[in-house]
Image (cartoon, rainbow, N blue to C red):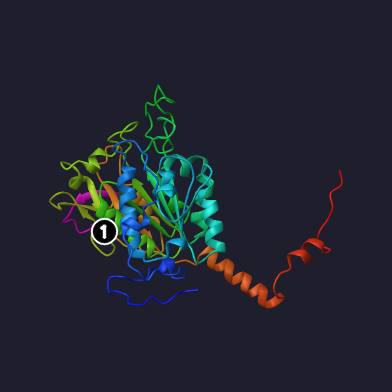
Amino acid sequence: MTEPRSAESPTRRRFRAFDLVPVENGKQTAKDFKSDQEVRWCPGCGDYVILAAFQSFLPELALKRENMVIVSGIGCSSRFPYYLDTYGMHSIHGRAPAIATGLACARPDLSVWVMTGDGDGLSIGGNHLIHTLRRNVNLRILLFNNRIYGLTKGQYSPTSEQGKVTKSSPAGSLDAPFNPLSLALGAEATFVARTLDSDRKHLIEVLRQASDHKGAAFVEILQNCPIYNDDAFEPLKSAESRDDVTIRLAHGERIVYGADGSKGIRRNPQTGSLEPCAADDPGVLVHDATAADPTTAFALSRLDDDAFSHVPVGVFRSVERPTYDGLMRDQIADATADQGPGDLEALLTGGDTWRVDN
């Protein structure tokens, strides 16, 4: 199924998630992945930046476009399949992970991506999302988190902060919000990361690492909705504050941050929780994204506060575990070797069927 790549340049490499996907030997550009559809989002929407970054990244994968599938549910982010010149499916609300699971299991020669939002993925689709992550299906899930329902005109979403005043919560939302990364880590996701729509370089690097992960890769993208929740992540985006509050996680490196690099993160010896400290504190943690125990990754996901005073971004966790689709193919191969190829007609007309009388 794998095709050899000829005349491969040193900068092109095979990403592990797509080792069974046919490669494109010819040169690709971002333009190759732009469809002929007019892009329709509100002016200033963060989706424009994410789309442009994604289209510019795809040539790096060097995969045949006919072997790429973008699956979405419902919402502003879910318009992605229209704007990419690949195969795609604009499916039903919250069910994109389930449809993508079927594709990934039946067609290992496909590169399968899920585009979803905080409303689509964490509300009606929450159950599908956590079980896809738990099963470790080999696909990439990009969750655009703008903490609001944008497509349906500004109702509070599962990630909106408590007390959020919206058209559906005029006196303030009473819900405690989801933390998407904590949810993914709690579901035993093998790859969990966070990035921002406004940081194109970081976004593409996270996509690169997600593509090099064999299994379910979950990426939260903090994304601005200029109409219904403008500046929701302003401390992380403002030139005056972003360097002081953003903690850029890098595997194997000390967790330090601040515009002058003067702050770090350590574990409180009394409570066991993580907390800010001085960068020269001897207890400053070294980030280990490959730790089998997700405890520290989970604590990092809980580190940010309502004021966004210290917010980690980057890859929180990246560990190896057999994929669901791979295990399924092995199981079918074993059963076929033991019992021979299946016969659907024989199954339907055999003695293991029954009739239900009214």
Residue at 17% from the left image edge and 49% from the top image edge: 258
- Residue 309 horizontal side relative to residue 161, left or right: left
Residue 207 showing in the rendered view: no
What is the three-letter code of the residue carrying label 1? Leu
Range drawn in magenta: 274-284
The C terminus - image quarter: top right
Vertical arrangement, residue 10 with respect to residue 96, above or below: below
Of residue 44 and residue 329, the one placed in the foreground of this image is 44
Disc 1 element: loop
Residue 217 in the image, given as x and y percentages of width and height = 42, 58
Residue at 52% from the left image edge and 42% from the top image edge: 93
- Residue 109 horizontal side relative to residue 164, left or right: right
Q: Is residue 232 magenta?
A: no
Of residue 92 and residue 302, the one placed in the foreground of this image is 92
Q: Is residue 275 magenta?
A: yes
Q: What residue is disc 1 on?
A: 285
Of residue 352 and residue 309, the one placed in the foreground of this image is 352
